[in-house]
Image: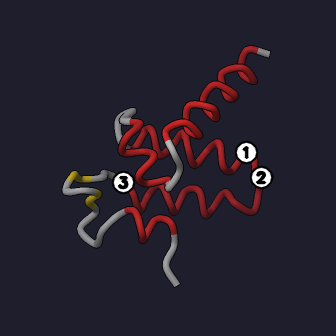
Amino acid sequence: MSTIHDNAVGAAGERDGMPVENSEDLVGTVTRLAGRMDLKTLERLYILRTLESVNGSRKMAVALLGISERTLRHKLRLYRTQALN
């Protein structure tokens, strides 16, 4: 059974020929934290850590996450709004 991570990142840690640094660390961190937080918080952490791991590249992040750029924009706008409240 493959995971989102397996589909997005090749065996060499690359996506579309570009290296993805710390992809194993990202999945490991989120997996360890999964039992301690609700799904919305876990999703937020995974999205933000993915963006961090690709140095803010939204194109690479959406490819790794398997979501559209529109969905990512919506979620980031939501996170900003929540942080301001």
Q: Camera-side residue: 58 or 44?
A: 58
Instruction: Of the two numbered discs 2 and 3 on the same chain, state the one appearing first in sequence.
Output: 3
Q: Residue 51's spot in the image, x, y percent?
A: 45, 39
Q: Amino acid at mark 3?
A: Asn
Residue at (59, 56) in percent of width and height: 30
Task: Name the quadrant containing residue 35.
Answer: bottom right
Q: Amino acid at mark 2?
A: Met
Q: Camera-side residue: 24 or 61?
A: 61
Q: Residue 17's spot in the image, x, y percent?
A: 19, 56
* Horizontal side of residue 59 vs 15, given as left or right: right
> Within 10 angstroms of label 2, few (less than 14), some, or many (20 or more) residues?
few
> Within 10 angstroms of label 3, few (less than 14), some, or many (20 or more) residues?
some
Q: Amino acid at mark 1?
A: Thr
Is label 1 in a helix, a strand or a loop? helix
Mark 3 = which residue?
Answer: 22
Is label 2 in a helix, a strand or a loop? loop
Is label 3 in a helix, a strand or a loop? loop
Q: CA distance from mark 2 to mark 3?
A: 22 Å
Q: Residue 59's spot in the image, x, y percent?
A: 37, 40
Mark 2 = which residue?
Answer: 37
**Mark 1, mark 2: which one is toward the viewer?**
1
Q: Residue 37's spot in the image, x, y percent?
A: 77, 52
Instruction: Name above or below for residue 65 compared with residue 81.
Output: below
Instruction: Name above or below for residue 72 compared with residue 82.
Output: below
C-beta proximity under 8 Å, tags 1 and 2 = yes
Residue at (69, 60) in percent of width and height: 34
Q: Camera-side residue: 78 or 39?
A: 78
Mark 1 = which residue?
Answer: 41
Residue at (50, 66) in percent of width and height: 4
